[in-house]
Image: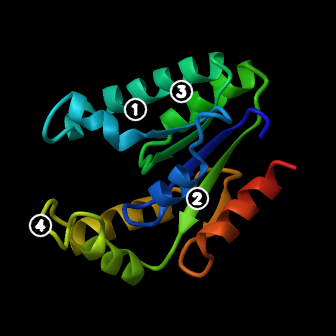
């Protein structure tokens, strides 16, 4: 795969991580950055530190690009400033980059939230219907300009990947 940046934006439980993981391949120099993984660097509740969480993810992306990696970034990105920074970095390196907004119904998100990895086993708590609805509404009211919409409710993983790959051709 030629070097590129894929940004996956969407609510929790929408399928960002599943989709991003399917691209990850060290031999082909494709890395995955899960923005949420940077939260643990700062606090149990990293909400006050989101600027630093996102900044750390963006800095990591910049490094990986200089090392020749394609990067798939997955995040909620309620505030889209980090998306702007990622796109600027990619443009500065002359690397194609696109934002994909993952979409599904609120009901499906709420159901998936209760079934996410670790929840049935009691290893993590679901975010809850109210939190999911709040994030869902925020993202729907603030779409990223010129983003490509991907329906993860009706399209299987392979179809979503196909749509992403075709958008770069």
Residue at which label 2 appears: 101
- How much space separates mark 2 and mark 1, taking CA atoms? 18 Å
The mark nearer the N terminus, 2 or 3, is 3
Position of 96 with respect to 116 (left or right) is right
Closer to the camera in the image, 137 or 39: 39
Label 2: state its secondary structure. Answer: strand
Name above or below for residue 157 compared with residue 70. below
- How much space separates mark 2 and mark 4, taking CA atoms? 30 Å
Closer to the camera in the image, 146 or 96: 96
Residue at which label 3 appears: 61
**Foreground mark, 1 or 4?**
4
Residue 122 circle label: 4
Residue at which label 1 appears: 54
Counting from the top left corner in percent of width and height, residue 124 is at: 16, 60
Counting from the top left corner in percent of width and height, residue 10 is at: 48, 58
| Most distant residue in the right direction | 169
Q: Where's the N terminus, which quadrant?
A: top right
The mark nearer the N terminus, 2 or 1, is 1
Counting from the top left corner in percent of width and height, residue 123 is at: 14, 60
Label 3: state its secondary structure. Answer: helix
Counting from the top left corner in percent of width and height, residue 20 is at: 54, 51
Query: Image point 76% across, 54% down: which residue?
Result: 165
Q: Residue 12 falls in which quadrant of the image? A: bottom left
- How much space separates mark 2 and mark 3, taking CA atoms? 19 Å
Circles 2 and 3: CB distance less than 8 Å? no
Closer to the camera in the image, 140 or 122: 122
Label 1: state its secondary structure. Answer: helix
């Amino acid at each position: 795969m030629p070097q590129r940046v894929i940004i996956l934006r969407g609510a929790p439980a929408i399928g960002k991580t599943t989709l991003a993981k399917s691209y990850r391949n060290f031999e082909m120099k494709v890395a995955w950055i899960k923005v949420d993984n940077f939260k643990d660097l700062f606090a149990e509740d990293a909400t006050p530190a989101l600027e630093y969480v996102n900044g750390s993810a963006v800095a990591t992306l910049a490094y990986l690009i200089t090392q020749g990696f394609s990067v798939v970034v997955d995040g909620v990105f309620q505030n889209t400033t980090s998306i702007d920074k990622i796109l600027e970095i990619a443009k500065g390196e002359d690397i194609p980059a696109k934002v994909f907004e993952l979409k599904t119904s609120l009901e499906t998100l709420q159901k998936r939230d209760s079934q996410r990895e670790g929840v049935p086993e009691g290893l993590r708590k679901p975010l809850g219907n109210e939190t999911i609805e709040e994030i869902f509404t925020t993202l729907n009211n603030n779409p990223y300009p010129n983003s490509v919409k991907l329906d993860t409710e009706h399209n299987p993983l392979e179809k979503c990947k196909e749509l992403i790959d075709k958008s770069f051709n």
